[in-house]
Amino acid sequence: DTGVSQDPRHKITKRGQNVTFRCDPISEHNRLYWYRQTLGQGPEFLTYFQNEAQLEKSRLLSDRFSAERPKGSFSTLEIQRTEQGDSAMYLCASSETSTLSEQYFGPGTRLTVT
Amino acid sequence: AQTVTQSQPEMSVQEAETVTLSCTYDTSENNYYLFWYKQPPSRQMILVIRQEAYKQQNATENRFSVNFQKAAKSFSLKISDSQLGDTAMYFCAFRQGAQKLVFGQGTRLTINP
């Protein structure tokens, strides 16, 4: 296992379509985080899981966004009825539970809504 | 809510020079962690250095060191003997416990040959 992977790396979609992204964390990591990064800005927290439980959701995560981690391994982030404002880089990170543990980031999925 | 502010949107230095990136944060907590992350162009974010708030000694990792001033809520990053590979976006981040990271807006650092 070489790190956090995300798929796809790039996604272009038309406004109103649904999209789904996948994140595969480092295998022994039980925490998984989703962040959104718009151009020229720092990442903003969206949600995180400990195993399969979703423990926190940001107010940025509108009802068009849903995230799952069904077996405590990979996670999916779905955006329904995409809007142009959803265009961003979606980053996934994983970590162990310890407070000293580092979050390791994936390469991100760049979403463009036309 | 915690906030992180990076007041230098862009910086540029010559190779081998020393550069310092600034970061301030706001929190009412006493125990927390601070980080500097590097995001090279079109590459993923990696951790450069971290500081535990309960430690008075400033963290150092090879050419990278921090100046942590807890009372002033300041956390600057110093890069010594800068190299072309240091060119990247640098993000200061705050974390309480094992929870989410709160990032600053970033500083775009360019190292010129």
Image (tube, coloured by chain):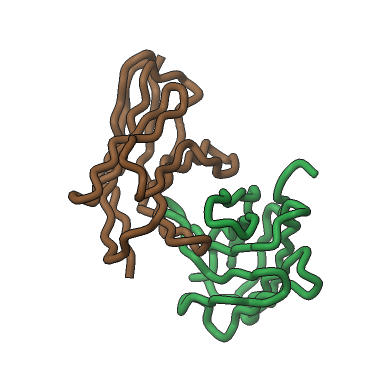
Find residue B11 and report its image quarter.
Answer: top left
Classify residue A17 as left or right of residue B19: right
Residue farthest left in this picture: B72
| Left or right, residue B92 beside residue B8 | right
Closer to us: A75 or B8: A75
Instruction: Give the residue at x 47% y 42%.
Output: B37
Q: Residue furthest bottom?
A: A63
Q: Colour of chain B?
A: brown
- Quarter of the picture containing the N terminus of chain A is top right
Inspect this view and state whether residue A21 appears.
yes
* Image x and y of residue B38, in percent: 48, 39
Spot occupied by residue A40 in the image (x, y as percentages of width and height): 41, 51
Q: Is residue A105 above or below residue A49?
A: above
- Is residue A109 visible in the rendered image? The answer is no
Which x, y percent locates residue B23?
A: 28, 46
Closest to the observer: B55 or B13? B55
Position of the C terminus of chain A, as image quadrant, is: bottom right
- The colour with which the image depicts chain A is green
Decide which of B50, A86 is in the foreground and name it. B50
